[in-house]
Amino acid sequence: MKAFLILLRPKQWVKNLFLFAPLIFSQHLFEEGYFATAVLGFAAFCLLSSGVYVINDIFDREADKRHPLKRQRPIAAGAVSPGAGFVFAAVLLALAALLSSALNDSFRLTAGLYLVLNLAYSFRLKQLILIDVFIIAAGFMLRVLAGAFVIDVEVSHWLVLCTLFVSLFLALSKRRGELLLARETGEASGREVLKEYDTAFADQMITISASGMAISYALYTVAERTVTIFKTENLIFTTVFVLFGIFRYLYLLKKRSTEDNPTMLLITDPVMMVNVAAWFVACVVIIYSKELQRWF
């Protein structure tokens, strides 16, 4: 059972929190019906993404055996057979489909597109330079769109743009970590695409993505539509947390140069976790100030 639990990669479920972004910024966070529907969508995406991870581990098992960290994954280590892995993935995808059946067509279509895109990534697209990181970025954007569709609200174009830069930033950070790890171990872990990248190129793209993320978020907070909807200009003050988060992440990226899993940097660094929590609280207080005043 432990091996199958590891196959789920529950730590990666933090990526699915992107589904809650439309809920927060649509001003429906404290409405029970909206929140429950968003949670159901989150659960469906957790099962869906875990199913994709299992399939990816099956097809990458030979390459993972040569990787200094991924060799410990259950399928690569032989703790779970490929056949059992396929059955497990099928069960996860079936459960995801079952949960999605209670949601609307737009959400199901988005989830289906996420599945197809990630299967294509596992089979071939991960070996194409730049296409690989944009596919990863598309996965995050589909999560945001799914979060909007599941509660039937309009998604802000600024929110999609910010998500694009955030996801590119994380995907490129992952590639940079893989490059440095491959350099230290002398093993490219079966990823032919790594031969097309180098750290200088990755650093340039990371800088561009970080700049785009900061600028697009700052512009979103002062956009006329944003100010009109939230009836306040105070959202601009949350930019401080975004900038600090970017700088802290870059610092951690340099300090832990061989970390090839950017999610771990987000959930293991106490300072980063406090900063994210502070950003969330600040957004909620600013966006829902009237509701909070009524409560208190």
Image (tube, rainbow, N blue to C red):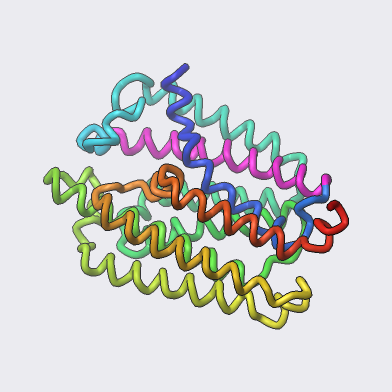
Residue at 23% x, 38% y is 67
Q: Is residue 216 left or right of residue 54?
A: right
Q: Residue furthest bottom?
A: 224
Residue at 58% x, 79% y is 219
Main SS, magenta residues? helix
Q: Residue furthest top?
A: 1
Where does residue 249 sit, x and y in percent of width and height?
38, 58
Which is nearer the eye, 177 or 139?
Answer: 177
Compared to 215, does 82 lie above or below? above
Where does residue 10 sit, x and y in percent of width and height?
50, 34
Residue at 60% x, 48% y is 112
Which is nearer the eye, 292 or 28?
Answer: 292
Q: Residue furthest left?
A: 186
Which is nearer the eye, 32 or 57?
Answer: 32
Where does residue 23 sit, x and y in percent of width and height?
71, 56
Q: Is residue 252 magenta?
A: no
Q: Is residue 146 left or right of residue 247?
A: right
Q: Residue furthest right?
A: 294
Over which residues does the magenta segment extend?
A: 32-61
Q: Is residue 222 left or right of residue 129?
A: right
Where does residue 121 sit, x and y in percent of width and height?
41, 51
Q: Is residue 53 magenta?
A: yes
Q: Is residue 249 left or right of residue 110?
A: left
Residue at 32% x, 59% y is 251
User: What is the count of numbered marks?
Assistant: 0
Which is nearer the eye, 54 or 276?
Answer: 276
